[in-house]
């Protein structure tokens, strides 16, 4: 089994915010593959199904971003999964809007959700898929990640969510190296 986790904050207040782009990718995967992600478990919402013949658990932590790791650890422990079985999807202010970046491991890069996952698992050796939401600095950071995309930005982020779901499907079917080679490209080359 593989575990695909989208990071975000629960509740309607946060549904359309930049910080919840990970939830949007999980929702897109669920829609494409007929997986119901409404079961309560592992301190979040989950859904089990099959994507490309691979058994998958989709997870949207309900712990709020800064405590996401607890939910991930609970699911990893229950299913006795190894770090390479995990892919965490998050927003990233260091990337241009809509740019995708897959990595096999690495630091949290200042992302509190990823920091929590690393702290709870005691290791940073798991896959992550980051989606660019543009960078702002200083006091504007919190307001930026908790604000919705503008209509113009949505024209970029909507297709980026679909590409991110494509990247997860590629990871499941062909592994991280292939997914990185295919999706860690500039937007004008994406999918070619």
Image (cartoon, rainbow, N blue to C red):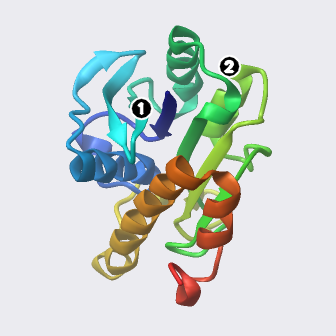
Q: Nearer the viewer, residue 42 or 36?
A: 36
- Percent position of residue 62, x then y: 38, 26
Q: Which residue is mark 2?
A: 120
158 on left or right of 181: left
SS for callout 2: helix
- Percent position of residue 117, x then y: 64, 29
Q: Nearer the viewer, mark 2 or mark 1?
A: 1
Q: Nearer the viewer, residue 113 or 25?
A: 25
- Percent position of residue 76, x then y: 57, 18
* Above/below status of 10 relative to 96: above
At a point 50% along the width and 60% down the height, the residue shown is 167
183 on left or right of 107: left
At a point 70% along the width and 37% down the height, the residue shown is 126
48 on left or right of 4: left
At a point 42% along the width and 33% down the height, the residue shown is 56
SS for callout 1: strand
| Outermost residue, front side | 53
Q: Which mark is residue 30?
A: none
Q: Nearer the viewer, residue 13 or 78?
A: 78
What is the CA distance from the residue labelled 2 to the residue labelled 1? Answer: 24 Å
Q: Which residue is mark 1?
A: 55
At a point 58% along the width and 18% down the height, the residue shown is 73
């Amino acid at each position: 089994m593989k575990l695909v986790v989208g990071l975000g904050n629960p509740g309607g207040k946060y549904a359309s915010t930049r910080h919840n782009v990970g939830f949007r990718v999980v929702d897109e995967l669920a829609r494409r593959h007929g997986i119901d992600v409404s079961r309560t478990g592992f301190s979040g919402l989950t859904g089990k199904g099959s994507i490309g013949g691979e058994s998958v658990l989709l997870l949207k932590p309900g712990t709020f971003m800064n405590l996401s790791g607890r939910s991930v650890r609970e699911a990893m422990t229950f299913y006795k999964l190894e770090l390479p079985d995990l892919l965490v999807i998050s927003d990233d202010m260091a990337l241009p809007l809509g740019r995708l970046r897959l990595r096999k491991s690495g630091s949290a890069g200042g992302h509190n959700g990823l920091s929590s996952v690393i702290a709870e698992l005691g290791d940073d050796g798991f896959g992550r898929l980051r989606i660019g939401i543009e960078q702002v600095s200083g006091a504007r950071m919190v307001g930026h990640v908790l604000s919705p995309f503008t209509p113009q930005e949505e024209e970029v982020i909507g297709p980026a969510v679909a590409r991110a779901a494509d990247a997860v499907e590629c990871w499941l079917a062909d592994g991280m190296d292939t997914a990185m080679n295919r999706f860690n490209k500039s937007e004008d080359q994406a999918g070619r």
